[in-house]
Image: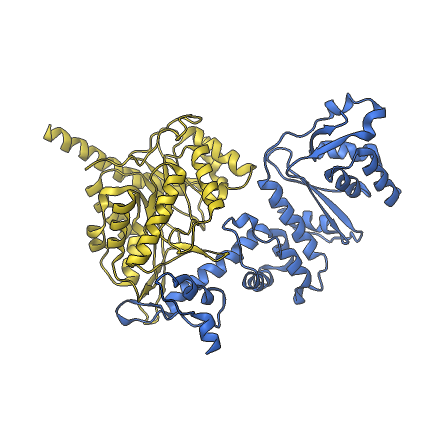
Chain colours: A yellow, B blue
Amino acid sequence: MPKLAIHADRSASGTLRFPAHPIDGLAGTSFKHQHLPSILADGDRDDGFFEVHAENYMGAGGPPHAALARIREDYPVSLHGVCMSIGGPQPLDKAHLGRFAQLVERYEPALVSEHLAWSTHNTTYYNDLLPLPYTETTLRRVAEHINEVQVAIRRPLLLENPSTYVRFKESTMSETAFIREIVRRTGCGLLLDINNVFVSATNQDYSALEYLSDYPLEHVGEIHLAGHAEQEDDEGDRLLIDSHDGPVADDVWRLFDIVVDRCGPIPTLIEWDSAIPEWPVLKAEAKAAQAILDRYAALQRERKHANA
Amino acid sequence: MQTLRKCHPETLDGLGYPAGFVHGLLDPDCPTPALVAGPNGKAADKRFNVYRNNVTVSLIDALAAVFPATMRITGEAFFRAMARFHIRKAPPTSPLLFEYGRDFPDFIEHYEYAQSMPWLADVARIERAWLDAYHAADAAVLEAGPLALIPPERLSDLVFVAHPATRIVRSAYPAVTIFSANRASDPVGRIDATAPESALVTRPALEVEVRLLPPGVDTFLDGLIAGEPLGNAAATASTCCLEFDLSAAIRMMLEAGAVAAIQQGG
Ligand SMILES: [Fe+2]
């Protein structure tokens, strides 16, 4: 199978303003500005990467750009869009797409991703990752949107699977079938959010393992791990909420182990976006992921050696 | 049936799902959309409530992040109730949440339960200007050196380029004093100020700075920012304010980094 050029080591223009830090096999964390002094102080530059929400860097200047430029000097960065509304039927916001492409150009991120979801309808922005029906009609529209993004950023996009709480009655295919077909039509890569898999599987009453066996793992360029919260649905059963406000659940770590065993050490991010802990706590969570990645990297080398 | 049609417009082409989904997000009177369900025949009310809650809470949180002093003054419960009214009336129209809340100070000004705090809207205006300054384009500020080289007789013809971060907020109340006391982490003591105040908001490097402007300097800087020559701006400020002190005003303008360069007359 041809290997997807998911990581770009240089910008499309060929000018390289930041060092080309490789991201393969690394664990990373969400970049929070309050952590910057601690990150720089502990000086542990030999590993790790940081992921930023693209929208936070779409202002003209000021401290956000200064912080991102500083971190990008020393570490690989993953640019994660949260509101392109790729999963909505209306045309993409051209101004927003332009800003997104500009960030890709300016910061030369190692990874670029967006969500299979929508957040804008007409002119209102709802600030949430809202779900879509999985049908031939929506598939065609989503594929067009991804192609448009990939043309604008001049590289493949990683598409992230959502956490969902409802299903659409009009859906005619499974989420995995939908994603598989999107990959086939657009050549995009995938960001596999394993917490989202676990949350959606619990909420939609299917098996996370079955989801993973139907999912095109060979196209995964990044993994997300995060914490979730628990509520109840109308019937009093467990309803999981993709809250990103705590440590990664044991069930999610177990699924991570299985995925890494199958795919090898893929760049893995600990997402922690609210109730944000001190840097050492977040860093420890990333180190736990790194240990698992390293174990499978060693195993992969052994397997290769044995085959040689 | 009118309500139901508003909440769930019918769609025929398979691409109308957002219209069927969004009304209930900000309107608690709309029922769970008919186009969604739980698995295996389960209900979707609490499930849909997750989206309602995500949207409402995250937008209230967004306003709380932009207006922390305003929230400190009103208390959290009051602020969140006020913000909830606002997000239902005026949800964001841009995915950039740091642009959100521009209409919020006007909303506060007319908010029934905030009428006893007539200065609250102006505190919010300073906070909104603070965030605009924070995200404004980076630019060097005009230093005293180049200005000192200008012969005195040519000073009055000078026209300046405002620094991209510079904002002036005028208040009929002591809004700057109230803002400063409530943005700091120290406990807020008694505030005795009663006079009208104007704020100068700048960001000469990476830190946003908010200054209380002496009398007339707001008019003077407003004139300069609008592109008036220094002489005109100073004359207008002196006419409307007898205490206006031009050299102190220029010193403050330079110290705050309010202007980026001399545009002409240099
Ligand atoms: Fe994620």
Q: Quadrant of the C terminus of chain A?
A: top left
Q: Nearer the viewer, residue A209 or A45?
A: A209
Look at 68% across and 52% down and name the residue there: B123
| Residue furthest bottom as drawn | B1
Q: Is residue A149 above or below residue B27?
A: above
Residue nearest the viewer, comparing A215 with B71: A215
Quadrant of image for the N terminus of chain A? top left
Q: Residue B118 appears at what percent x and percent y?
A: 72, 60
Foreground of the two, A298 or A18: A18
Q: Is residue A271 above or below residue A25?
A: below
Q: Quadrant of residue B252?
A: top right
Q: Which residue is at the far front? A: B13
Task: Please indicate, yes or no, whether residue A140 appears anywhere in the rendered image.
Answer: yes
Image vertical order of residue A85 relative to residue A288, above or below = below
Instruction: Give the image location of residue A168, x and y in percent.
Output: 32, 64
Q: How many marks?
A: 0
Where residue B60 sits in the image (x, y, percent)? 53, 58
Residue lying at the far left in this picture: please name it: A307
Q: Estimate the x, y position of residue B256 in percent, counting from the top left.
A: 70, 35
Q: Is residue A265 left or right of residue B77?
A: left
Q: Is residue A270 left or right of residue A301?
A: right
Res A32 seen here: no
